[in-house]
Amino acid sequence: MTASGYVILEDRGILAIEGPDRASFLQGLVSNDVFKVAPGRAVYAALLSPQGKFQFDFVMAASGEALLLDCERARLADLARRLSLFKLRANVTLADRSEALAVAAIVGADVLRALDLALVAGAARALGEGIVLIDPRLADMGGRAILPRDGAESLMRQAGLEPVDRAAYERLRLSLGLPDGSRDMPVDKAILLENGFDELNGVDWDKGCFMGQELTARTRYRGLVKKRLMPVRIDGETPPPGTEIRQGDRAVGETRSAQEGLGLALIRLDALDRPDVPMTAGDATLTPVKPAWARL
């Protein structure tokens, strides 16, 4: 992309966690170090099941006396309910702020100049009554903003940004190989390290225990990652998510989200050793593309 712009992500919501115990409350639950979240830094993390399977992912940012979780809006109530189960005596409150706050993605060549931020994943600063940040997963993904809904578009224009089509954001995301929550990581099935969470700054290996840590750590230290989510070029009709991928006479993966000849797929790593044997999904031929950030 040559021009910078923004898109309001209407499918994203904001869960605010407030109270003096907010950081310690989350610290034992999520995959990243909550105490690293600060006015100048946002963090990417996930909440897992006790068995180590994916439940939710979110960007965590600090705003005054609150931690703001940028999460899937359709699943926000379920996330709040799950977290509430662990409140016990913690002095925290959980509130849906999606009506008051909007999430914007900022993409293009001039993102850094528009946001006045360093090219560092997770770098953040205040903007008016909101927050702007570099995507904590991968700086190449551009920026994000959490802004008062009523003035979000005005603030973006004041920063020299114009609205862009959601398709531009999706093309960038897919080309970089970044999962989009439960669209790409099936709940109760997906494993973090198969979906790039290690390289995408989603796990802190030094923070201590968190829910689902045992499987996550075992997968890493025993070298048990046998599949990876990665971009694929699609030649032919785009297959729906969940379509089986075949290489010759064997199943080697499943498709995930896709758009205009580009998609994501969970693929067995040993299938990549046979580049001469085409991969197919339905009537389409798929060509895997290793992301530059991935350690495969």
Image (cartoon, helix red, strand yellow):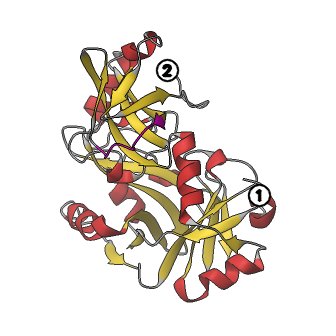
Residue name at image x 46 percent, y 85 percent: 100
Give the image quarter of residue 69: bottom left
Residue 218 % position (x, y): 30, 23
Q: Are marks 2 and 1 in contact (CB under 8 Å)?
A: no
User: Which sits in the foreground, 52 or 25?
Assistant: 52
- Lower sequence index among marks 2 and 1: 1
Residue name at image x 68 percent, y 75 percent: 127
**Residue 12, numbered circle:** none
Report which residue position mark 2 lands on: 296
Query: In whole angstroms, how far apart are the C-alphas of marks 2 and 1?
Result: 29 Å
Can residue 136 be found in the magenta stretch?
no
Which secondary structure lies at badge 1? helix
Task: Tell me if mark 2 has few (under 14), some (14-19) or many (20+) residues whose alpha carbon lies within 10 angstroms of its own.
Answer: few
Which secondary structure lies at badge 2? loop
The amino acid at mark 2 is Leu
The amino acid at mark 1 is Leu
Residue 35 % position (x, y): 49, 53
User: Which sits in the foreground, 71 or 232?
Assistant: 232
Report which residue position mark 1 lands on: 112
Task: Tell me if mark 1 has few (under 14), some (14-19) or many (20+) residues whose alpha carbon lies within 10 angstroms of its own.
Answer: many
Can residue 238 be found in the magenta stretch?
yes
Query: Magenta stretch mostly in which secondary structure?
Result: loop
Residue 111 % position (x, y): 74, 59
Residue 34 % position (x, y): 45, 53
Compared with residue 286, is residue 100 higher up or lower down, i.e. above or below?
below
Which residues fall within the magenta stretch? 234-241
Compared with residue 284, is residue 105 higher up or lower down, i.e. above or below?
below
- Please indicate whether residue 255 sits to the left or right of residue 140 in the image: left
